Amino acid sequence: MTIADRPLLLALPLKSGVINASDDLLESASAIFEWVSLFFGVVVFVGVSIEVWLAWSRFSDTGTIGHWGPVFADFLVAAGVGGEIWFAFRASRCQGELSRRSKKELGEAKDRLADIEVRNAFLEESAAMAMERAATLEKEAAIARERVAQIEKITAWRRVSPEQHGQIVAAIRESVALFDLLIEFQANDPEAYLFAREIANIFVAAGVGKIRLSGDSYLSGDVFGIRIATAPGTDSTVVSSAFAYAGIPLTLFEIDLSTHLSRAQVAPNLYIFVAPKPPLPHVAMAKGTAAGTSNVAAVSVATRESNI
């Protein structure tokens, strides 16, 4: 208890003093009051002891001790009992105020705990919703990535991978020495041109000595993918099978190679046309022999560009 708190200790008999006192002051005052109450209890004991002593000693009533001794002893007993009751009451008031504050703080703590629990429940619910939303977004992102992959696959240029190149070369190397190969690609189609060059490189690596590469256009019919034709007496089964096994299917169709080129040019015995990429990745645009014949028989505008 500080010096500044001592005047407030004097006001503790008043209700406002107890209510306005600090917790530390109330605890100190309660301890003091208990000791003072104990002191008055000792006073009561002393007063009673004096009365017993006076009764045992049998002093004369006319003497000072015999006349005033009992009065003094009764005064001590009365003062002791009154002081003990009063200071015990004040100590009880201090303890009651401390108890009231503890209960109030406990109630406020419970209210704060309930508020925290409500907030935690809200946060847990928000976290669950966020996790659910994140899972939904992840699922949507996976779908979007799959769609992007599909679009990329649809729009990507056709290419011959190194594995496909080596696999086809190894399969046809022993069977293509006598081929006179003409490879044409859709004119003004850079994707078809690049794919045709990579196909031509396969036959160069396989040992085909005669290879021509040029652009052409078919103005009627749906011509997509890769078409292959042979002159009478030429077998292209090995080539078609090797390409198909490597994942590059060739569509066989009939065409008169003897009249496909001008008279000044030597007719090939093996013909490959790299048409535009099919509009869908798994749609085979083969029409069969009759349809292929009608398409190939359509007008063809040759834009012969280069030879290998």
Image (tube, grey):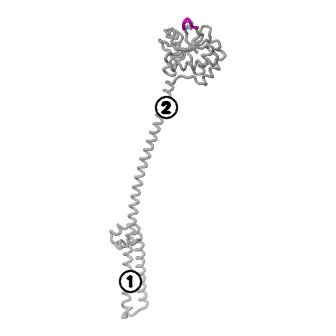
Q: Label 1 is placed on what type of residue?
A: Leu
Q: Nearer the viewer, residue 118 or 273?
A: 273
Q: Residue at x 39, y 80 (%)?
A: 80
Percent position (x, y) of residue 18? Answer: 35, 69
Q: Is residue 258 above or below residue 200?
A: above
Q: Nearer the viewer, residue 259 or 223?
A: 259
Q: Indicate whether residue 261 is drawn in magenta.
A: yes
Percent position (x, y) of residue 113? Answer: 42, 54
Q: Residue at x 42, y 75 (%)?
A: 35
Percent position (x, y) of residue 222? Answer: 48, 14
Q: Is residue 255 above or below residue 47?
A: above
Q: Residue at x 62, y 8 (%)?
A: 233
Number of the label disc, if any, that sits on residue 76: 1
Q: Residues within 10 Å of mark 2 (few under 14, many from 20)?
A: few
Number of the label disc, if any, that sits on residue 31: none
Q: Label 2 is placed on what type of residue?
A: Arg
Q: Residues within 10 Å of mark 1 (few under 14, many from 20)?
A: many
Q: CA distance from mark 2 to mark 1?
A: 99 Å
Number of the label disc, if any, that sits on residue 145: 2
Quarter of the image for residue 259 reads: top right
Q: Which stretch is magenta? A: 260-265
Image quadrant where one finds the C terminus: top right
Element marked by disc 2 = helix
Quarter of the image for residue 64 reads: bottom left
Q: Indicate whether residue 224 is drawn in magenta.
A: no
Element marked by disc 1 = helix
In the rendered image, the residue lying farthest to the top is 263
Task: Tell me if 190 is positioned left or right of 241 in this view.
Answer: left
Of badges 2 and 1, nearer the viewer stands 2
In the rendered image, the residue lying farthest to the right is 174
Task: Tell me if 306 is positioned left or right of 132 in this view.
Answer: right
